[in-house]
Amino acid sequence: MIDLYTWTTPNGRKVSILLEELGVPYTAHAIDIGKDDQFAPGFLKISPNNKIPAIVDQETGLSLMESGAILLYLAQKHQRFTVEGEEYWRMVEWLMWQMGGLGPMLGQAHHFLKFNRGTSDYAETRYGKEAQRLYSVLNTRLDGRDYVAGEGNGAYTIADMAIFPWIARFEWQDIDLNAYPNVKDWYLRLADRPAVQKGYHVPKFVSDLPMP
Ligand SMILES: N[C@@H](CCC(=O)N[C@@H](CS)C(=O)NCC(=O)O)C(=O)O
């Protein structure tokens, strides 16, 4: 049994999507980051960086923070949604691209383009352009491929699951998905999966999965 501490944000949704794909038992605990639940002393013991998501694996007692580490742990534990050989490293490469680039940059785009528009032209231009650049990079990677890693036209892995909930906020980022046709096809491919639809609404329903 996995205890998942999460909220309705891209980093949280990555993990609930994987848990739904794995079909393993888990309990989702809502950490309302708008009410500062992430600073509660009990939560800090498992997530010392004050952020969701975090898990505790009740089978082993292991607690983990950082969504990328959690995805790698669960994929390795269950030997699913991962690939082998050189492609393993390609998967890690795109997972790290999400963790170090796509997530942090789109997070800033949300701040300046969605929540604080009009406060900084510089930040709007910087993060708006960076969002477009990152979508172009992903669009190029997905040219002739169904998924970001894996041999041939690819295999569905945790790297796709990490990227998906960030792309699901394309409207917040002023992105027209039609301008990135490979990303759009990939997005619709993942959005069609029942586990993605279910995992997206953990720990609670906020709104439907956005459709381009
Ligand atoms: N690198 C971390 C980032 C986690 C993160 O930024 N979580 C946000 C929600 S998506 C959070 O908990 N924010 C609360 C806060 O900043 O106080 C991961 O991928 O797990």
Image (tube, helix red, strand yellow):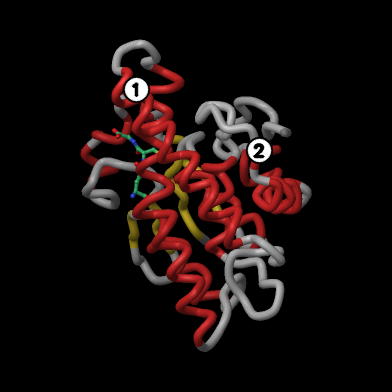
Q: Is residue 18 above or below residue 211?
A: below
Q: Residue at x 60, y 26 (%)?
A: 206
* Residue contact at pointers 1 and 2, CB within 8 angstroms: no
Q: Which residue is mark 2?
A: 177
Q: Which residue is mark 1?
A: 35
Q: What is the secondary structure assignment of the residue under circle 2? A: helix
Q: Position of residue 78 (x, y in %)?
A: 56, 75
Q: Position of residue 195 (x, y in %)?
A: 70, 52
Q: Is residue 206 above or below residue 65?
A: above
Mark 1 neighbour class, 10 Å CA radius: few under 14, some 14 to 19, many 20 or more: few
Q: Residue at x 39, y 36 (%)?
A: 107
Question: Residue 106 or 140: which is nearer the viewer?
Answer: 140
Question: Residue 188 or 120: which is nearer the viewer?
Answer: 120
Give residue 37's quadrant in the image.
top left
Q: Which mark is residue 61?
A: none
Q: Residue at x 53, y 46 (%)?
A: 135
> Could you tell whether 192 is left or right of 77 in the image?
right
Q: Is residue 46 above or below residue 178?
A: below
Type of amino acid under label 1: Lys
* Distance CA(mark 1)–CA(mark 2): 33 Å
Q: Position of residue 81 (x, y in %)?
A: 61, 70
Name of the residue lying farthest toward the top:
118
